[in-house]
Amino acid sequence: NFLTSDLDSYSYLKKVAAEGHLYNGFNLLAADFNTAEGDVICYYGNKGEPDPVFLSPG
């Protein structure tokens, strides 16, 4: 569970991606706010790229 884990958003989505092929199509956004790098938002969909991607503002 992302909300109770110590993983950052990208690491959590990498973990989800390892089992993504087991499920019907889905899209998932995960975010970390107020980090040293600023706000970080990542996306993973199990029908596209094999790894999560960082989303840029805008």
Image (tube, rainbow, N blue to C red):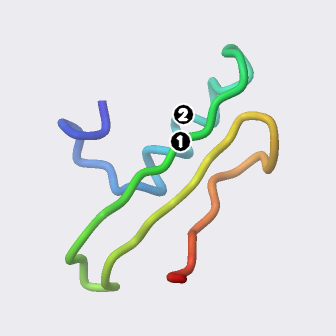
Q: Quick one: quadrant of the N terminus? A: top left
Total residue callouts: 2
Position of 9 with respect to 48 (left or right) is: left
Q: What element carries label 2?
A: helix
Q: Which of marks 2 and 1 is nearer the N terminus?
A: 2
Position of 27 with respect to 10 (left or right) is: right
Which label sits in the foreground, 2 or 1? 1
Q: Do the residues labelled 2 and 1 touch (CB within 8 Å)?
A: yes
Name the residue carrying label 1. 28
Q: In this view, does 18 lie above or below 41?
A: above
Q: Where is residue 54 in the image (x, y as percent from the top left)?
A: 57, 68
Q: In which quarter of the image is residue 17?
A: top right
Q: What element carries label 1?
A: strand
Find the distance from the CA under tag 2 to the CA under tag 1.
Answer: 9 Å
At label 1, the amino acid type is: Leu
Q: Quick one: quadrant of the C terminus? A: bottom right
Mark 2 is surrounded, within 10 Å at the Cα level, by few (under 14), some (14 to 19) or many (20 or more) other residues, namely some
At label 2, the amino acid type is: Val
At 18% from the left edge and 36% from the top edge, which residue is drawn?
4
Position of 6 with respect to 20 (left or right) is: left
Q: Residue furthest right?
A: 48
Q: Nearer the viewer, residue 29 or 16?
A: 29
Position of 27 with respect to 37 (left or right) is: right
Q: Where is residue 34 in the image (x, y as percent from the top left)?
A: 20, 77
Name the residue carrying label 2. 16
At 72% from the left edge and 25% from the top edge, which residue is drawn?
25
